[in-house]
Amino acid sequence: MRRVARPPARILITGASGAIGAALAQAYAAKGVHLVLHGRRFEALEALAEACRTHGATVELSSIELTDDEALHAWLDDLTLPDLVIANAGQNHHAAQGELMEEWDATQRLLAINLHVPMAMAQRLAPRMAARGHGQLVFVSSLAAWHGLPLTPSYSASKAGIKAYAEALRGRLAPQGVGVSVVMPGYVSSPMCTAMPGPKPWELSPELAARRIVRGIARNRARISFPFPLNVGCWWLAVLPAGVSQRLLAWMGYGGES
Ligand SMILES: NC(=O)c1ccc[n+]([C@@H]2O[C@H](COP(=O)([O-])OP(=O)(O)OC[C@H]3O[C@@H](n4cnc5c(N)ncnc54)[C@H](OP(=O)(O)O)[C@@H]3O)[C@@H](O)[C@H]2O)c1
């Protein structure tokens, strides 16, 4: 994978034990870079740390419970303030076969990690970054944020929520020297992607997705959305009359049947 020319010195990535997070960690791994990697599967994190160290990065690992505000805030307060924070950990789920609605406990867990945790991270980190006068917060959303998918309502809601939050925060933090970007990937090969129902056009490898994300972050892009054809298609769903979008989604295989 292509390395970043001048990467930020301290980078925190959540969901580093997953496909996109691990590819991002490897893309940033270089001499002079310190990576703080979070994931629940510690063995996967340790293997990733070894790979990153071979590229010259220093690495620290964490598996604290992100959805516990107290544990999250204590962890963030103890860290040397990162230059770049990528809130990437996330989940997807959908209604079981034959069920109309998604399982509620699973929906609450999804909202906690996809929406509550990234906002709680920003709540704690943004004031310190603003006081220092620089930093960058990156939130991983999805193209599903443009228009909700009937197959995955809770996921779509969480990703639309974090997109709106990131866009709003960008305007609020820019005068303080803090950058904010929202990442909106299409389909990226991962266990999560495999488990998702529906067609998966233009599926990308995690490495290619990481390259797009790293490039967008380096330019402090407001939105890092890809691949281009799917991004345009999903954007149209948001601007077309709602009835047309719903018919298009059903016709393309993203209707209510899981
Ligand atoms: N893959 C796609 O097609 C796609 C498309 C659009 C957006 N995204 C977004 O990209 C991000 C990364 O997804 P991915 O494709 O790399 O999926 P993945 O391989 O399944 O990785 C998900 C990561 O999130 C972590 N995670 C999930 N729930 C967590 C929790 N409650 N607490 C802490 N960590 C948790 C997982 O930790 P463990 O491995 O330790 O469980 C893992 O590191 C997600 O936000 C996802 O919504 C993915």
Image (tube, grey):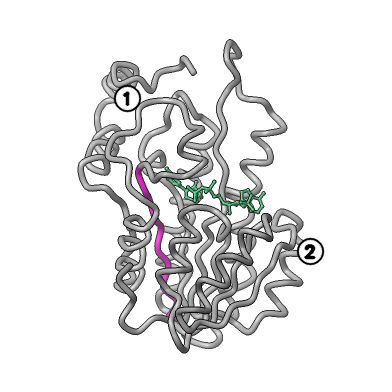
Q: Residues within 10 Å of mark 1 (few under 14, many from 20)?
A: few
Is the CB atom of the residue marked by disc 1 within 8 angstroms of ligand 1's nearest atom?
no
- The image quadrant of residue 129 is bottom right
Helix, strand or loop under label 2: helix
- The image quadrant of residue 200 is top left
Label 1 amino acid? Answer: Ala
Give the residue at x 54% y 53%.
18
Q: Is residue 178 magenta?
A: yes
Specify which label sits upstream in the sequence, 2 or 1: 2
Q: Nearer the viewer, residue 133 or 49?
A: 49
- The x and y percentages for residue 160 are 45, 43
215 vs 56, left or right, is left
- The residue lying furthest to the top in this view is 98
Q: Which residues are magenta?
A: 177-186
Q: Residues within 10 Å of mark 2 (few under 14, many from 20)?
A: few
- The x and y percentages for residue 17 are 58, 57
Give the residue at x 45% y 68%.
26
Please tell me the numbered disc located at residue 132. Answer: none
Q: Quadrant of the N terminus?
A: bottom left
Q: Is residue 11 magenta?
A: no
Q: Which residue is mark 2?
A: 70
* Vertical position of residue 79 compared to residue 214: above or below: below
- The x and y percentages for residue 30 are 43, 81
Please tell me the numbered disc located at residue 242. Answer: 1
